[in-house]
């Protein structure tokens, strides 16, 4: 079970609602999609727009997983791999296809919100990555140049320009991607479900897929109150991947990310912090990230190496960080607190998997799930339609388990101690 609602803040702010009945009895479809987060919904929408009969099963409610629990930042880049690194890792042809998909992913998200009138507080006001050391500012300059060379609306910001955008002098520079922004992710997920349903997808909440059975002419998905037969299966269960596809589960490490939100800021304070209403997440491994919601709260968060007594410990840490960045927020209270799990891969790259018998899935958002999930919807559609591996925007990969996965899964959060040490070490200038 996923526990409490995704976020009291997002629920309070969301003007989008959605509900769907559970799967009952026997049903058939061409493609079954397992997972009602943005990844699964984007796939269902893309499949329906291609004329494919599609049924989506969600274990809880739409947006109950990471899609309704994240910070809401829309970032059309990866966490670690710049374009040059993607091309080196994937090869020229495959890397170009992937980068084209990634570069257009935020366009697709915001265009979808506009086309289907999804009321999700969409703010395409840009995304900023502040650099916390001089060496990382140089890296930010190179990163901006690589994206700008591809035609992305990216620019380097020196320290004064960054301070003007951020409302803080705590950084050494950074870069800005004007195509990014932020949304209420729970509202977007609900609106995306409505859009997929409007296009003819059948959606069932409270319909956990308990078992997948291969049959001569397709698959049988067994849920608590019903059975769904299909020709092909798309699994988009992210960090909540379980024994339904055991080999997939062993390829990722779930990591918990916590979110906090302040009270509504005083108008004079809100006007000084992120005056252009961008979203921001810095160059640390132990991220400082934040944006403002439509009523003027600062939505931020962090991670913990040890999860015990999470709320008061994280509040103390984030309060101290914000006081360094924005002295006017010293002593801030956080009436809103929630968390969710992110699917991490060891190299921080997403994975597409496809088996000869029609089982398809992608996993590994690595903290950049909103834009990437929208872009991957079309990739999953193409995989279902039988596109050749070499023609897909992300090449299918073998299911390679993380070594010592049970141990790594239990201890991965302790790596944060190592990452914090790295954050204090300068990179070569």
Image (cartoon, rainbow, N blue to C red):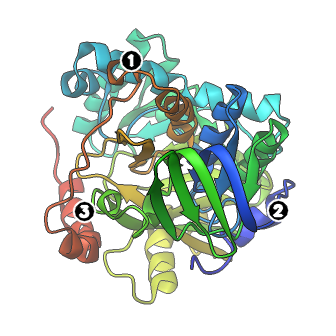
Which sits in the foreground, 47 or 190? Answer: 47
**Rendered residue at 12%/36% (across/down):** 428
**Rendered residue at 44%/43% (across/down):** 360
Q: Which residue is mark 3?
A: 420
Which sits in the foreground, 13 or 63? Answer: 63
In x, y percent, where is residue 79? 36, 42
Q: Which mark's residue is nearer the viewer, 1 or 2?
A: 1
**Rendered residue at 69%/37% (across/down):** 45
| Res 37 → quadrant | bottom right
* Outermost front residue: 216
Work out how far the residue at label 3 is from the one at label 1, CA to CA, in angstroms: 40 Å
Q: Residues within 10 Å of mark 3 (few under 14, many from 20)?
A: some
**Rendered residue at 80%/39% (across/down):** 200
* Residue 391 badge: 1
Q: Which residue is mark 2?
A: 19
Going from N to C along the chain, the mark reached first, 3 or 1, is 1
Going from N to C along the chain, the mark reached first, 3 or 2, is 2
Quarter of the N terminus within the rendering:
bottom right
In x, y percent, where is residue 276? 67, 35
In x, y percent, where is residue 290? 56, 53
Q: Residues within 10 Å of mark 2 (few under 14, many from 20)?
A: some
């Amino acid at each position: 079970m996923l526990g409490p609602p995704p976020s009291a803040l997002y629920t309070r702010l969301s003007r989008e609602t959605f509900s769907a009945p559970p799967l009952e009895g026997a049903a058939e479809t061409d493609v079954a999609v397992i997972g009602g987060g943005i990844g699964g919904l984007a796939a269902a929408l893309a499949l329906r727009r291609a004329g494919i009969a599609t049924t989506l099963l969600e274990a809880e409610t739409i947006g109950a997983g990471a899609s309704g629990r994240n910070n809401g930042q829309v970032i059309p880049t990866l966490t670690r791999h710049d374009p040059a690194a993607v091309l080196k890792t994937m090869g020229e042809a495959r890397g170009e296809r992937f980068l084209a998909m990634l570069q257009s992913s935020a366009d697709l998200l915001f265009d979808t919100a506009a086309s289907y009138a999804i009321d999700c507080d969409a703010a395409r006001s840009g995304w900023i990555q502040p650099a916390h050391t001089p060496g990382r500012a140089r890296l930010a300059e190179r990163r901006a140049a690589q994206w700008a060379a591809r035609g992305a609306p990216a620019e380097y910001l020196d320290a004064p320009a960054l301070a003007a955008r951020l409302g803080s002098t705590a950084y050494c520079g950074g870069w800005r991607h004007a195509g990014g922004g932020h949304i209420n992710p729970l509202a977007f997920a609900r609106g995306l479900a409505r859009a997929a349903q409007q296009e003819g997808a059948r959606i069932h909440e409270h319909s956990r897929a308990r078992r997948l059975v291969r049959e001569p002419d397709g698959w049988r998905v067994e849920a608590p109150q019903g059975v769904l037969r299909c020709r092909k299966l798309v699994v988009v269960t992210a960090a909540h991947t379980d024994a339904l596809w055991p080999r997939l589960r062993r390829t990722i490490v779930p990591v918990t990310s916590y979110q906090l939100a302040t009270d509504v800021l005083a108008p004079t304070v809100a006007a000084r912090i992120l005056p252009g209403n961008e979203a921001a997440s810095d160059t640390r491994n132990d991220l400082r990230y934040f944006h403002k919601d439509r009523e003027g709260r600062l939505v931020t968060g962090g991670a913990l190496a040890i999860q015990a007594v999470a709320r008061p410990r994280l509040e103390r840490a984030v309060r101290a960080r914000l006081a360094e960045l924005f002295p006017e927020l010293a002593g801030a209270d956080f009436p809103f607190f929630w968390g969710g799990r992110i699917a991490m891969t060891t190299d921080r790259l997403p994975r597409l998997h496809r088996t000869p018998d029609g089982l398809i899935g992608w996993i590994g958002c690595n903290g950049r799930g909103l834009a990437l999930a929208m872009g991957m919807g079309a990739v999953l559609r193409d995989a279902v339609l039988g596109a050749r591996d070499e023609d897909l925007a992300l090449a299918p990969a073998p299911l390679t388990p993380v070594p010592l996965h049970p141990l790594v899964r239990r201890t991965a959060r302790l790596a944060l101690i190592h990452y914090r040490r790295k954050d204090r070490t300068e990179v070569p200038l």
